[in-house]
Amino acid sequence: MRFCIVGAGFSGAIIARHLSERGHQVLVLDERPHTAGNCHTERDSATGVMVHNYGPHIFHTSDQRAWDYVNRFGTFRPYINRVKAVSGGRVYTLPVNLLTINQFFNLTLSPDEARAFIASKGDSSITDPQNFEEQALSMIGPELYHAFFRGYTRKQWGMEPTELPASILKRLPLRFNYDDNYFNHLHQGMPENGYTAIIDAILDTPNVEVRLGEKFEDVEESFRHVFYTGPLDRYFGFRLGRLGYRTLDFERIEADGDYQGTAVINHCDETTPYTRISEHKHFAPWEADTFKRTVAFREYSRLCGEADIPYYPIRLVNEKSMLNSYIDLANNTAGVSFLGRLGTYRYLDMDVTISEALDACDRIDVLLAKGSTFPAFFNL
Ligand code: FAD
Ligand code: UDP
């Protein structure tokens, strides 16, 4: 009997290739008409621009193994994510850096002066921040919090920042120099021919059949084992309830030339209904000037309904206790392992997804050699 992989994103493709290289037969299923999962990219037929269909994806990592792995399957071009932010009718740079601070407060502080200035703004009575708002108030003080984070976060998550974990804000750097690179990682880049070409190259191996446009639920074949990278609650028919997600709506803008002059502009004011606008030709600066027309997308966030695509796991108290019940259920279910962003209900960047899939491959080798069964989770 062959193995089945549900989902042709990074997680599924990496496991499929590994099993194939060990001589096993593998069926990869995806209900979408394309491979690459949420990282899917394709050339826009109207403009020719390479579009990231499910929102902008920038590859950034300090994990050498993940970086080496993706570079085996395609060429990455240098790309640095430099985000702009509109707040109160003015444009700033993010993450908060010395230029943001000096422009916002109309000052000309040096790095040390800015550090002391921001420390004086921070609420020193908050010693152990318990939520997003407390984290922000203790770290940057009320003015920057209200200008850049409060409104955007309420739009993005649909709830009060006091209800959200402090960890969400900790994703972003705070800098006291003029470095406006959105990420701190060692490597950053954009695949020359898009992510889908990379994932197709990973899947281009003997012993792997890729079947697109087909749901796992509709397949009658029996498998030696299933590696499931779809939503954990969906595998069990939502029998314990639905894990909460935010979904996104994208509103297309097409224009001549250059629409906004950069790849990503965040719109931090709450009076603006969308969170950000991404103009995709700027994700490929090496070819951006070759297109006469341009395409950009306004991004709106809302609670994920039953028919929507799940994007961001919410993971508040309710979801966490439901998640634990699903984990127990999965641990008591033979024949299936859950991986990836949806299978483990975690927000995972691509590099973490890749690293976890590669770790799972190492464990798979050990378990196959011993003749043991596979666990429900490799990474939880
Ligand atoms: P997915 O890519 O979600 O693949 C799962 C696949 O399973 C899907 O194609 C789905 O169709 C299929 N599937 C599910 N259930 C079934 C079923 N029952 N039957 C058949 N098929 C099924 N990461 C970064 O590193 N940098 C970024 O800039 C970045 N930006 C992001 C922006 C947004 C808006 C979002 C939501 C994510 C972003 N990410 C980013 C994270 C990145 O998308 C994930 O790390 C990556 O997609 C996870 O891969 P995966 O294989 O686990 O899951
Ligand atoms: N955030 C914000 N304003 C911004 C950018 C980010 O308030 O201009 C908050 C928001 O809550 C977001 C979090 O910081 O969810 C993490 O930002 P990141 O850019 O990592 O968001 P993601 O890539 O998850 O969309």
Image: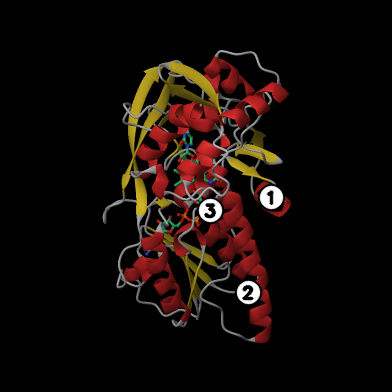
**Mark nearer the N terminus (1 vs 3):** 1
Q: Which residue is mark 1?
A: 72
Mark 1 and mark 3: Cα distance apart in space: 21 Å
Q: Would you say residue 264 is visible in this rendering?
A: no
Q: Which residue is mark 3?
A: 348
Left or right position of 270 against 144: left
Q: Would you say residue 369 is visible in this rendering?
A: yes
Residues at badges 1 and 3 in contact (C-beta under 8 Å)?
Answer: no
**Mark nearer the N terminus (2 vs 3):** 3
User: Image quadrant for the C terminus?
Assistant: bottom right
- The image quarter containing residue 288 is top right
Looking at the rendered image, the disc whose residue lies closer to the viewer, 1 or 3, is: 3
Graded by Cα atoms within 10 Å as few (under 14), some (14 to 19) or many (20 or more), the crowding at tag 1 reads few
Graded by Cα atoms within 10 Å as few (under 14), some (14 to 19) or many (20 or more), the crowding at tag 3 reads some
Task: Say above or below: 54 vs 86.
Answer: below
Looking at the rendered image, the disc whose residue lies closer to the viewer, 2 or 3, is: 3
Give the residue displayed 55% in from the left and 78% down from the top.
375
Mark 2 and mark 3: Cα distance apart in space: 21 Å
Closest to the observer: 206 or 249?
249
Q: Amino acid at mark 3?
A: Leu
The local secondary structure at tag 1 comes to helix
Q: Which residue is mark 2?
A: 364
Give the residue displayed 55% in from the left and 39% down from the top.
138
The local secondary structure at tag 3 comes to loop
Task: Say above or below: 119 vs 205.
Answer: above
Residue 355 lies, in percent from the top left, at 63, 58
Mark 1 and mark 2: Cα distance apart in space: 21 Å
Q: Amino acid at mark 1?
A: Arg
